[in-house]
Amino acid sequence: MTNRQVEVLVGEARGLHNRNIQNTNNDTFVEVYVDKHCKQRTKVVNTIEYPTWNETLILNLPDLEKHHLLHVHVYSKDIVGKDSIGSATIDLKQIIGGAEFDQWVQLSGPLHLSTFGEVHLTIKYL
C-alpha cells in the first residue's frame, strides 16, 4: 500500500470573528485533519486582524473512500483549552485527481449560519 498524503499550506487569515470577551487579540491557530485521530496544527499567532502562519502541514490519507474530507478549524487559544473561531470542510477528491487548490476558504461559525472570516489555503496531493 502506498503512503498517500496531502500537503496543506496554511497561509494567512482575514476578517476573523473575535471570540475574546475582553476584546483583546486572539492567540490564533489553525488545526487541520482528514482523520480525527491524526490532527496537525500551526503555531499560535497573537493577532486577530491578519494572522499569518505560512506553515506547511503534511497529512496522511489512510483510506480515500472514508477519509476524503479535509477539516479546517481556526481556534483562539485560552488559558484553559481553546475557543472555536470558525471552521470549514474541503472535499479532497478533485485535488487527489490533480486539480490545484489555492483559495480563500470561508469559515462558518456555530450552526453554519454566518461567515466568521477566511483562511488562505494551498493544497497539493503528494
Image (cartoon, rainbow, N blue to C red):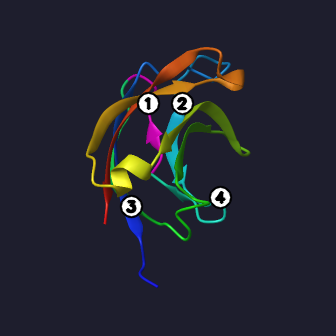
**In terms of secondary structure, where does tag 2 sit?**
loop
**Where residue 122 sits in the image (x, y, percent)?**
30, 45
**Where residue 14 sits in the image (x, y, percent)?**
38, 23
Q: Earlier in the sequence, mark 4 or mark 3?
A: 3
Residue receiving disc 3 = 6
Q: Amino acid at mark 2?
A: Asn
Looking at the rendering, which quadrant does residue 62 occupy?
bottom right
Residue receiving disc 2 = 26
Q: Residues within 10 Å of mark 3 (few under 14, many from 20)?
A: some
Q: Earlier in the sequence, mark 1 or mark 2?
A: 2
Q: Residue at x 43, y 18 (%)?
A: 15
Q: Amino acid at mark 1?
A: Thr
In the displayed structure, 118 sits above or below 36; it is above
Residue receiving disc 4 = 36
| Measured Cα–Cα span from mark 2 to mark 3 | 28 Å
Q: Residues within 10 Å of mark 4 (few under 14, many from 20)?
A: few
Q: Amino acid at mark 4?
A: Lys
| Stretch of the chain drawn in magenta | 43-49
Q: Earlier in the sequence, mark 1 or mark 4?
A: 4
Q: Residue at x 63, y 23 (%)?
A: 109
